Amino acid sequence: MNKPRLNIGIVGYGFMGRTHSNAFRRVPNFFDVPYEPVLKAICGRNQARAEAFQQTWGYESVETDWRKLVGRRDIDVIDIASPNDTHAEVAIAAAQAGKAVLCEKPLGRNAAESKAIVAAAEKAGVPNMVWYNYRRVPAVRLAKELIGEGRLGRVFHYRAKFLQDWTISKDLPQGGEALWRLDAAVAGSGVTGDLLAHCIDTAIWLNGFIDSVAAVTETFIKERKHNLTGKIQEVGIDDASTFLARFANGSLGNFEATRYALGHKALYTLEINGENASIIWDLEDLHRLQYFDYRDEGKLRGWRSIHITDGDHPYMKHWWVPGLQIGYEHTFVHQAADFLCGLAEGNVPGPSFLDGLATDYVTDAVLTAAKSSAWEKVGNPQ
Amino acid sequence: MNKPRLNIGIVGYGFMGRTHSNAFRRVPNFFDVPYEPVLKAICGRNQARAEAFQQTWGYESVETDWRKLVGRRDIDVIDIASPNDTHAEVAIAAAQAGKAVLCEKPLGRNAAESKAIVAAAEKAGVPNMVWYNYRRVPAVRLAKELIGEGRLGRVFHYRAKFLQDWTISKDLPQGGEALWRLDAAVAGSGVTGDLLAHCIDTAIWLNGFIDSVAAVTETFIKERKHNLTGKIQEVGIDDASTFLARFANGSLGNFEATRYALGHKALYTLEINGENASIIWDLEDLHRLQYFDYRDEGKLRGWRSIHITDGDHPYMKHWWVPGLQIGYEHTFVHQAADFLCGLAEGNVPGPSFLDGLATDYVTDAVLTAAKSSAWEKVGNPQ
Amino acid sequence: MNKPRLNIGIVGYGFMGRTHSNAFRRVPNFFDVPYEPVLKAICGRNQARAEAFQQTWGYESVETDWRKLVGRRDIDVIDIASPNDTHAEVAIAAAQAGKAVLCEKPLGRNAAESKAIVAAAEKAGVPNMVWYNYRRVPAVRLAKELIGEGRLGRVFHYRAKFLQDWTISKDLPQGGEALWRLDAAVAGSGVTGDLLAHCIDTAIWLNGFIDSVAAVTETFIKERKHNLTGKIQEVGIDDASTFLARFANGSLGNFEATRYALGHKALYTLEINGENASIIWDLEDLHRLQYFDYRDEGKLRGWRSIHITDGDHPYMKHWWVPGLQIGYEHTFVHQAADFLCGLAEGNVPGPSFLDGLATDYVTDAVLTAAKSSAWEKVGNPQ
Amino acid sequence: MNKPRLNIGIVGYGFMGRTHSNAFRRVPNFFDVPYEPVLKAICGRNQARAEAFQQTWGYESVETDWRKLVGRRDIDVIDIASPNDTHAEVAIAAAQAGKAVLCEKPLGRNAAESKAIVAAAEKAGVPNMVWYNYRRVPAVRLAKELIGEGRLGRVFHYRAKFLQDWTISKDLPQGGEALWRLDAAVAGSGVTGDLLAHCIDTAIWLNGFIDSVAAVTETFIKERKHNLTGKIQEVGIDDASTFLARFANGSLGNFEATRYALGHKALYTLEINGENASIIWDLEDLHRLQYFDYRDEGKLRGWRSIHITDGDHPYMKHWWVPGLQIGYEHTFVHQAADFLCGLAEGNVPGPSFLDGLATDYVTDAVLTAAKSSAWEKVGNPQ
């Protein structure tokens, strides 16, 4: 009756610290998981903030040095939810300490960092996972099912974009607590690593590896005040990043990400055109899937707007009743559930660190192509 | 090679005079009709306006007295596009003169007028038709096909509304040229005869007769300046009219029309829920049909948004290529085409004058029920 | 630092038992509420099921007799999430025992039951609330704000419907565990109390009291096997219920609910047309509000699709970042948060038991009007 | 009163022959144009087909040799609606004969041809126009107005795609009457000249010149039967073509066209993101414009779906009443109206032949870049 406890230590109390904490808090209420996940420790540099976070989420303890956390023998899982520049160091140390390691995306700031992380995890043989959470939107998982069942046939086109509009103001500073995503040193890159990485992870998962890319990036606002130095400094990140791709399966890809598309807050859309069927999905209405099947009767062919709330839709039998939608945060609960089940079976599902590296090879190639003004081959992790 | 000419005399040079003129002008360019329709005469009270209309549309002659038009031996078809208070008089005289008679909807201002029109047409044995044009929207006709094929099964619900917002301003006067629809003496009623009549005609066509109704009407603006008298006068029309219905087939109906629904200019929508399939259509996107079929595979069930522009959609092979939409005016062209073909075959399709009377029985019952605050039986024309 | 604990005992471990449990579990993670809500006891007739529920949700104790629960001195709040036929008895006893009382909607099976509940709560002076959760959808609350700010001006129309399709199969039995909503003795009525009640509560909240109604109800499947007796029995509930209404403010209402609208799982939509602005909302995309404002510049007037995920939208600053949607369950978390805050201030916000009674007066009038085939006045609770 | 007659000779009786004929037939019924356009002669190689076309559209005469048509003194305007490989020859001869020349898009099969056409027209000083008809969709013209009024501010992104799905079948042959668009010798290119050309013309019109491009093209079906030879032959056209662009104004462009996007028949969409406002338009619902303005009040910001049917929307006062949509063919009527008005004023509006050349410089660069795998500079026509 009593399940084994699994002690989790989370590094980072920001946006992602919240989504991960919520995932582990809620998973036992909705999924019959083989462990009782325990929020054992929250780790953040600022003691007061860490304690406030502890209070809100019910952590048993607080750490302000991730090294101490990694060194604790009562911690089973290190879950990294801190800014990108910490991922490699913490993940490698956690792996070396024999912990299961979960890491927020992107894995490293670039493929070199990610390679080192993968190497450490493989050497230590520890379970690992990257939080590319959109794989676990029920509609996206249904898309995966449909592709797996061969419904699309030969794929001609894969199209994805991730459009936001939150950095258009010139007065927005860069760097520091909430704005580290604008600081190239911390983030590694701009929308390429932040937004395109999501699109690429899903794309590889659904449509296979990418062979080569041509790209353009742009930094629309060239200088911003830096919150840490207080000075006006050059902006090092890419504000927008678009690339053309050739997939290994012969299909063409078109990817775009920007934070300068007014009217879109988090419009991650993807579309796949096969010879028999097409699929469209959109994060701003994540509970729907658009599906077009040429094999439908001619005069009645149309895009079906599937409301993904039925019991036979992925994950949905665990939630409410048909017609009642779930939201963004549930994708993390799903990933936590799959992690816990996989861990018990000795077979943690993807996205693994190796999957994370595959995405980083693409983002590296995109940034290179944007500089070289030429098509670039993508490194293959396998 | 040369087709017989069919001489048409149209009464009325307003909005409907234009749609009818356009219908007969265009039909030979797109449909292989058995007659060459000739715009022989336009008839309107104002000589100058009639001549301007003649010029614009290429009429051969002008009349200012409909009696003279009806008396002309070179006219084969009298097409009535003038305000409602002229329909009965003109239609009866035209029938008595042995002309084919087309009449803009509603047929009469009430069932009593319509009965007289039907009687005259039947006595004279002349071809006749009412311009309930929405039956010939390709999407609506596809709905009819689907119902005819038995796809819906037992029908539970029929829902229709026609929402407009053009009379909300208190400063809008009533009566006269462009605003006769607000003058009860001319129009007969307000939205009941103007908008609900459209909904009812389609409903009877698609779902059979209506047995009984309960209704509410409202006149939100009680007084308006009258354009003909120049005085503030009581408003006699209904601004809004809603009714519940029991259909002969056991299904329930919910109908609503108003000119006080801000944001909707011509939102005529209908929805039918059967035990196997449901249909939704909307005039403001008239080139689409929404279709839901329970027999689709479970996890892929969804509303299909069918873009009604393919060659196997009703009427569409006559127009352009798939993907390219037609608009409002084309419904009149379709009706003209069907009239001409039916005339040659001696079998003019509906909506006939009898169909027009059937609708007027319902609108009469609605207006009675709104006054009696009780359910009212609907008269049956057959 | 440590907040006072508030001990909650929930009656019912079904669908609503889950939504309420989840609400109290999650509220402290997202809202700075003045109490620490404690899931003290779950009460259900079946010991094994109650214990399983306890385990899943982390309740401290289990009761199988609600009388025992109500009698416990360590319980501060009785929250009723059991079938409708238990509401009056439990709520009255809980009030008499001096507990704060929360009750799932509808309050009673009819106005008579609800009057008794209101009387008991008023006599005891206990805080009380009904779980009409849709008031706390952020989009619906924004609609309330806009109306409160006078943006709509005079209201002409209020339109609401709640369409489902889950009871179309003739083979679905009635009664027992999961299907008590089809058993008139337990539920009180069919869609009138189950679905229309939601529409009415929101309508009164947004648009004021309803004066009179005309209605039609229908039971499409007349007999079903009863799960408790094992026999084919007459179905006592209404499968569909539609009514016309006159509001006290002069606007017209059109309400419809059914479980026979194929293609709609939980399509609760509402639309309000004012002289200056109109609003549309739809539960199947609950994170959006449609808004049309006539004061927008003419050529740019259009329905705005507002993605309700910004920090300045009601409740949303507590959740994630702009663009990331929440779902159905969050409405209960919001109500729990408002309840806890109101309790501390001695001023629990609505919907109160009196509000619940107001809705029951309307549903009673609807059912009466459906039988009388006449307009019926609605009782006024105040 | 009587307007001067303008005699038009149209070359080509295919799809575009119909749209042009319809445009000139209808324009006097809806626009007060300064000429009476006369369908003087239809020219096509097949005598029987030309005569049938003459009959349908009411042409006064038939020619089977375009040289004879161009040589006729009673022809004022030569309108070229025949396949792309005829454009240069006919247009140059017509210009040399001093006719006003209208040409279906693309102007030439490549920039070299178009340059020769422009040179001939400039030397002869004849009025000229290319039928890039989508400039005259009312919604697109409204977009142009909004940009002209400075509503968008600095533009960051321009995104356009034209997706079709009609050549996916391997069994579709290439070449001949209806399928010359698949024959590279006749068409010049595949979707680049057929579909991207439309996107590029609108883009330059709305957002200015394009500096440089990177591109990828693909021919998914490598061999098809050729209708003229009866043999299986290599397919020379591009089935899909995508390119990244840098505009002269500093914004980034993303363009894509394909005939392999199942579910889209003619999905030409464009989106422009400015610092203050964004615009989206979609050919499959051409009567709507989506508009987002950041200057709207925060909590009410949303994409406005503007139903482009009001009298203050471009061109719409000439058609019906608000709420009633027009369709695809009307764009040609609008262009005919603008041509006739401009001709009388001695100032024919664009798209001129020079505009047509500007687009061809971009399509040339796209095809070059797809081969070179490098960014290519775009030639500037001015």
Image (cartoon, coloured by chain):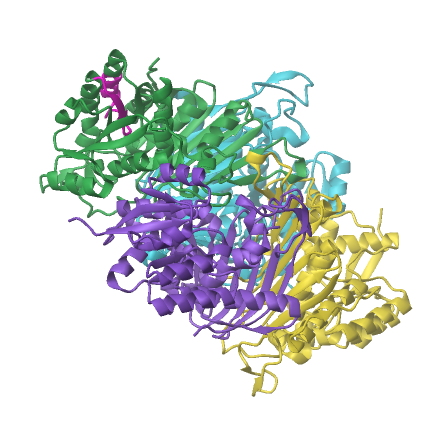
Chain colours: A green, B yellow, C purple, D cyan
Q: Is residue A239 above or below residue A101?
A: below
In the rendered structure, the answer to whether residue B93 lies left or right of residue B216 reads right
Q: Residue A190, position in %: x, y?
A: 25, 33
| Magenta stretch contains residue B21 | no
Magenta stretch in the rendered image: A98-118
- In the visual, does D14 lie left or right of D246? right
Which residue is at 49% across, 61% downward?
A: C108
Between B41 and C299, the one nearer to me in the picture:
C299
Above or below: residue C366 compared with residue B321: below
The image shows residue D341, relative to residue C309, as above or below, that is: below
Q: Looking at the rendering, which quadrant does residue A368 occupy?
A: top left
Q: Quadrant of the C terminus of chain C?
A: bottom left
Residue that appears at 35% across and 54% down: C71
x then y, percent, for residue C227: 61, 44
Image quadrant in which you'd find residue A138: top left
* Spot occupied by residue B361 in the image (x, y as percentages of width and height): 75, 69
